[in-house]
Image (tube, rainbow, N blue to C red):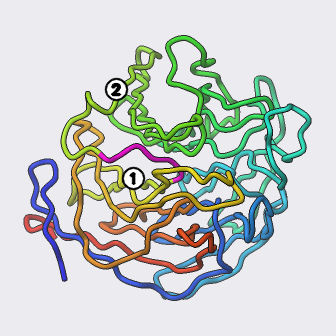
Amino acid sequence: MLLESVMAGSSLRCHWKSLAVGPAARSSHSVSALGSQIFVFGGEDKPRNAFDASLHRFGLSGVWNQLAPAPTGALLGHGAAALNGRLFAFGGRTGGPNDFGGAGASGETANLAIFDSKAEAWVLNSVSEPWPEPRSFHAMSAADGKVYMFGGCGAKGRLNDLWELDAVSGHWRCLHGGGAGAPAPRGGASLVTGPDRLVLIFGFDGTQRGDLAIFDLRKQSWEVLPQEAQRGQVPSPRSVFCAAELRCPALPPTALVFGGEQVASDLGHEGAGKFTDDLFALDTASLEWSKLEPGPGPCPRGWTGMACPDGEARAVLFGGLDDANTRLGDAWELVFESRSSL
């Protein structure tokens, strides 16, 4: 059944569709789109165990394929962003707990691996100065030839620095070092792009966050919007949700937010918190929220991933962790329709 939602003045309908079972069940992985293809990388099959170095591809044929392993080896909690046919994967953990003691027991890394979808090959980028410190569960996005990265969990604590990678030269630039004027340090957030801006969505800093933070790329400064200052049908505070940018000419520029953890587990990363299965859309121009009602679909989950193929009115979600602390291997497609355009 298709249930109608209204967003940005345009009448939209969307529904979930179950897809072919994908690679092994996992959480703390990434899901990215290059063209019309979906790529799944990394993750854990049990708490803090990075287990799969291979890249997995889902194409228009509806078949999953296993591709070459990344030169970084198996990772969990890495960041990923897709740009111009290439997948950029930074950082992540090789495994183990992180008590922020700085000893590196969790295997926090700072490698940058790039997968070229045309050559179907990985390249490990060389380290140059400046270079972001090792981290995991950070947020990444890409647009206009740049890859952006915010925060995450470092060896000595949560971070709130913001970095820009020039996708052509391969050089990093720190846009904001964190501290005063920046959003609170956090992991499990999402970063999306808007007109001349970056938008940081929610996350976890010891509590579930419900704020938006907007970085003006022209002024090089942050503005933080607490939950009560946001407009529309605002989601509840959460972290480790999945977010994807819908860039389709027939639909408004939109960030989709699905699921996530609303209450953290008393067992930390060993357990499962309270998850949700709601779906929201954030208009990245007006910064107004809408709740979407797509009907039956994925169960409540967190530590999951979702991506939107370029120029298409759909998104693909894979895997995650459910309320029973079970890793998931199901795949779903969210299909949008527009009365006026589709």
Most prominent secondary structure in the magenta stretch? loop
Image quadrant for the N terminus? bottom left
- Badge 2 crowding class, 10 Å Cα cut-off, few under 14, some 14 to 19, many 20 or more, is some
**In percent of the image, x 60 and y 62: which residue is there?**
272
Disc 2 and disc 1 in contact, CB within 8 angstroms: no
Q: Is residue 236 magenta?
A: yes
Q: Which residue is mark 1?
A: 245
**In percent of the image, x 83 and y 35: which residue is there?**
127
Instruction: Count up the numbered dots.
Output: 2
Res 116 quadrant in image: bottom right
Q: Residue type at mark 2? A: Leu
Q: Give 145 or 9, whichever is nearer the viewer.
A: 9
Give left or right: position of 288 versus 203. left
Find numbered disc 1 in the image and state the secondary structure of the residue it sits on. Answer: strand
- Report the span colored magenta: 235-240
On the image, the x and y values in percent for residue 153 come to 69, 38
